Image (cartoon, rainbow, N blue to C red):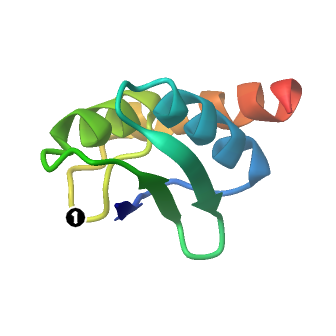
């Protein structure tokens, strides 16, 4: 089934590339798409508990909307953005 998470700190295609690769690497997740305009991450999964997806996003610097957004996470998202631009 299709799930969607709205994230913070999503700024560009570099961020989207990093998020796509990171979330797609998780077991039980497929067909990851990221919409920069709506700051949404969509994917298919049959799993009900998505806490591990929230954790992965936060570790990369993209916490879910409504979750704490520390300076450290903002810095991580900046680095992830740069790496995503170089790798895309």
Q: Along the horizontal axis of the image, is 14 left or right of 20?
A: right
Callout 1: 10 Å neighbours few (<14), some, many (20+)? few
Q: Residue at x 75, y 42 (%)?
A: 14
When the figure is inspected, residue 64 is found, relative to residue 53, above or below; the finding is below
Q: In the picture, which quadrant includes the N terminus?
A: bottom left
Task: Report which quarter residue 72 is drawn in.
Answer: top left
Q: Residue at x 30, y 39 (%)?
A: 53
Residue indicated by mark 1: 66
Q: Along the horizontal axis of the image, is 72 left or right of 33?
A: left
Q: Along the horizontal axis of the image, is 7 left or right of 48?
A: right
Residue 33 or residue 60, whichever sits in front: 33
Residue 71 or residue 5, whichever sits in front: 5
Q: Position of residue 55 (x, y in %)?
A: 26, 33
List the single residue furthest toward the bottom. Answer: 38
Q: Along the horizontal axis of the image, is 25 left or right of 70?
A: right
Q: Position of residue 76 (x, y in %)?
A: 50, 29
Q: Is residue 76 visible?
A: no
Label 1 secondary element: loop
Task: Report which quarter residue 6 is drawn in.
Answer: bottom left
Q: Is residue 42 visible?
A: yes
When the figure is inspected, residue 47 is found, relative to residue 40, above or below; the finding is above
Residue 32 or residue 56, whichever sits in front: 32
Q: Position of residue 51 (x, y in %)?
A: 17, 40
Q: In the picture, which quadrant includes the C terminus?
A: top right
For the image, the number of numbered tags is 1
């Amino acid at each position: 089934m299709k799930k969607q998470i709205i994230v913070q700190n999503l700024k560009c295609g570099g961020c989207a590339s990093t998020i796509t690769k990171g979330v797609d690497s998780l077991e039980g997740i497929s067909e990851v798409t990221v919409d920069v305009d709506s700051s949404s991450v969509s994917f298919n999964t049959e799993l009900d508990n998505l806490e591990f997806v929230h954790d992965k996003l936060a570790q990369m610097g993209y916490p879910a909307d409504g979750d704490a957004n520390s300076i450290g996470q903002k810095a991580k998202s900046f680095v992830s953005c740069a790496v995503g631009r170089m790798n895309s």
